[in-house]
Image (cartoon, rainbow, N blue to C red):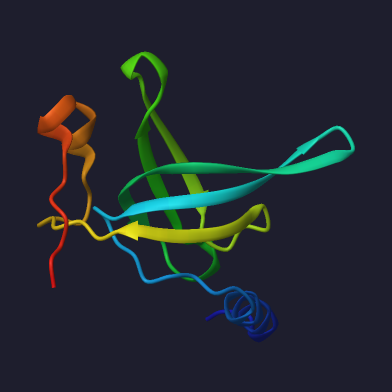
Amino acid sequence: MRNKYIEAFENAQINEKSVPDFRAGDTLRVAIRIQEGNKTRVQNFEGVCIARRGSGTSETFIIRKIGANNVGVERIFPIFSESIEEIKLLRRGRVRRAKLFYLRERRGKAAKIKELRK
């Protein structure tokens, strides 16, 4: 039993934002609005989506990229966050599972995901 007002608010939030159809294994570029003092700027975070979880307005996804000095960097983003400017799908990955946490232990070519060919 969910409150009808909360449900209506969540539906309005979901309909307001357009999210591309992506899943684990896809390479994404997420443009995040960052507030620094009284200035705002947009910073891109590009990497492989390793997981999606939740539903509705509380749905989140995890993106992993290799940063400086071959250090893995992961960020968790709420899909319907106000700070996310845009989610752009760059490549579709061919994977056989929904959560790709095994990529955390892999380095170099072993961590590569094949592109989905249509």
Above or below, 16 against 91 in this view is: below
Seen as rendered, the residue at the extreme right is 38
| Image-based side of 64 in relation to 87, left or right | left
The quadrant where residue 6 appears = bottom right
| Image-based side of 79 in relation to 36, left or right | left
Q: How many marks?
A: 0
Residue occupying the point 73% across, 42% down = 41
**Front-most of residues 54 and 42:** 42
The quadrant where residue 10 appears = bottom right
Q: Position of residue 23 (x, y in %)?
A: 29, 62
| Image-based side of 38 in relation to 65, left or right | right
Q: Position of residue 71 (x, y in %)?
A: 35, 19
| Image-based side of 59 in relation to 47, left or right | right
**Residue 106 in sight in this render:** no
Residue occupying the point 25% across, 60% down = 92
The quadrant where residue 68 appears = top left
Q: Position of residue 4 (x, y in %)?
A: 64, 86
**Front-most of residues 86 and 57:** 86
**Front-most of residues 18 and 98:** 18
Residue occupying the point 59% across, 81% down = 15
